[in-house]
Image (cartoon, helix red, strand yellow):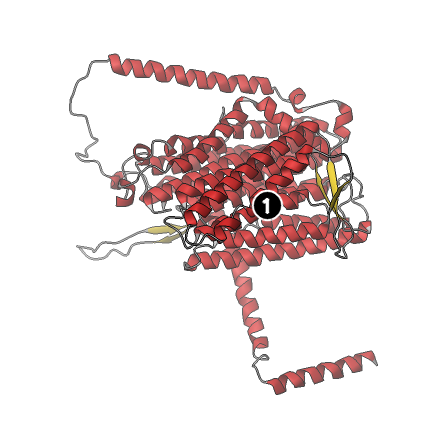
Amino acid sequence: MITTAGKPADPAFLIITGLALNAFSGVPGLFLKRAAAVGQKLATLLAVAGALCGLAGCFSAIASGETESFLINWSLPFGPCEIAIDPLAALFLLSVFLISGCCAVYANGYWPAAKQPATSRALSFFIGILSASMALLIIARNGVFFLMAWEVMAVSAYFAFTVESGKVEVRKAGMLYLVCTHTGTMALFVMFVLLRNMTGSFLLPPTASLSPFVPGAALVFFAALFGFGMKAGIMPLHIWLPAAHANGPSHVSAMMSGVMLKMGIYGIIRIISLFTPVPAWWGAVVLGLGIFSGVTGIVSAIGQNDIKRLLAYSSIENIGIITMGIGAALIGQSIGNQTLLFLGMGGALLHVLNHSLFKSLLFLGSGAIIHATGTREINRMGGLARRMPRTAPLFLLGAMAICGLPPLNGFVSEFLLYFGFFSGVKESTAPALLGMGLAVTALALIGALALACFVKVYGVAFLGLPRSAEAEDGHESPWQMSAAMGLLALSCLAVGLLPRYAAVLVQPAVFTLFPSLVASGSNISTHVPLDVLGAIGAALIAAAAILAVVYHRRLKSAPQASAATWGCGYLQPSARIQYTSTSFAEMLVRLFRGTVRPRYELPKISGFMPASAGFSSRIPDTVLDAAILPVLRVTGIVFSFFRRLQNGEQNLYVLYIFITLVLLLVWIH
């Protein structure tokens, strides 16, 4: 039974209804084994209905700016169980409902039940459970209830992206994911137990109600940073992310990257907001992790030849940008810089929403490419713009958005962060000045490297000549896939052209985290010229449209003539003379070789008439390969000795029990 702690609220009803519809969206398909296509369509209808209900509730909750709380009457011995919906929760729920609805529509073209009858029913079921569990943990206010939803989210994500478990690489990625996610969950157990000891209850205390200087507060901070950071993919806790995102179905990758990573960000923000005044070193730690994640993430992405692994490392980069904003906001709070506080957290929260839009668009676009060519290798693509006339511009728009180019949404959130960082440079003391200077430099470097990265992706995949028979036979995606990508692309454009309304979505969440800002009467628009940004974006689109019209008319009116052109000495150009993904990124990979540690397999050429030879390169995960796996190997050798003790002979087990009892008796006396 649920009882309200306040007045009845339609937003809460809509959100809970949307959550329930998502949870049950895949259930009908489980009972329609002989009509899998019907089950998939029912799942899509329920998921879309849930998304619409949830989005309506989220917008209403953000507009009201109020918090609605409810008590669940349960019999578990963990105290009262509360759920609550405030503007911060509603902002994160926007991504959950929007992306889940788009992915449900996309799946009908990408993973149709008619062609995938063995896996489509399970996939629809677990995606629905994944979406509902993420929504549930966002509104949970009891630590134990939160962990229940967290575990359901982790397990459902595992079953969703390992649906093709017959592949060895999928099973390896799944095992790595399970180990990492449960390692992070252990840290969350520690965190909630410490909070229980500090407050006397598993209920999360009100915002800004705890002191960071009491015993155990720093341990809560580090446990939250480790546990939630593992889920968010903050470096060096990211090791599960590239393999999981690369080996799952593309719409599952979109859900995991666009939404599930943000559950870690949500947890970090929610837990840190319980403490006030936040020490400056907390903000410095978060800012440092953000800079490290942002720079190393995009550097690792540049050298990837697998399009989905590239997008996965790019997600680490964007998580780093979000974390930088959070760290800057905490520093601004500690030094009393309200502009840095407002724009740092506002930019971070807006980038949470923006990243869910453009990264989901890019993952769905990569799925369209894989659907058309049957390969994830960028070096085997090429010339797809002519063969995929709908996917090509949509992917280009997503690539421009992730690079922070106007007039798209990535530009707006990064612009807020730049303004915040510069305000910190202008008004801060020496230590904060150093941090903000590093943040500005890192954000500029990340933007430049991201631009190079996605110029490579789009140029090699969509332009030039096909590099393989698969690319030559490429085809456009079904309309369901294009429709889902189109909606996300329009959302990216809408945020870029209407930044004032995007700020209206974010401001109530910032006020929820920092109630002191309400009394100051300031808002994001007072610090950043959002209307000017929107006008610049509209002017850019108008200028591009005018240039396109003028160019088209000049082409039509120009006299046509035919003549041989200079082919630079090549009478018949071929795909072999084009830049590959590897060659395009070679200079940057070599520049950062100390970080990415590229591995090359060079051809062995001998004799006057050498045989055919090949060259390949790979960018490994440095943290996993150089730090974690060696430790695990040593640990395995050590524990191999203890495996000998468990040999299945019962008389030895009885002897172990007897020795243990004797030692306990000796210890007692």
Q: Secondary structure at mark 1?
A: helix
Residue 336 in view in this figure: yes
Q: Position of residue 258 (x, y in %)?
A: 53, 41
Nearer to the camera, 58 or 571: 58
In the picture, residue 12 is in which quadrant?
top right
Identified by mark 1, the residue type is Ala
Local packing at callout 1 (Cα closer than 10 Å; few below 14, some 14-19, many 20+) is: many
At x 20%, y 57%, the residue is: 607
Describe residue 461's horizontal placement relative to residue 80 as left or right.
left
Nearer to the camera, 480 or 449: 480
At x 19%, y 27%, the residue is: 566
In the displayed structure, 430 sits above or below 603; it is above
Q: Quadrant of the C terminus?
A: bottom right
Residue lying at the far bottom of the rendered structure:
651
Residue 300 in view in this figure: no
Describe residue 47's horizontal placement relative to residue 79 as left or right.
left
Describe residue 408's horizontal placement relative to residue 285 as left or right.
left
Q: Position of residue 392 (x, y in %)?
A: 37, 33
Q: Position of residue 527 (x, y in %)?
A: 66, 22
Describe residue 448's horizontal placement relative to residue 614 as left or right.
right
In the picture, residue 7 is in which quadrant?
top right
At x 45%, y 43%, the residue is: 41
Nearer to the camera, 436 or 453: 453
Q: Which residue is mark 1?
A: 132
Residue lying at the far right of the rendered structure:
669
In the picture, residue 83 is in which quadrant?
top right
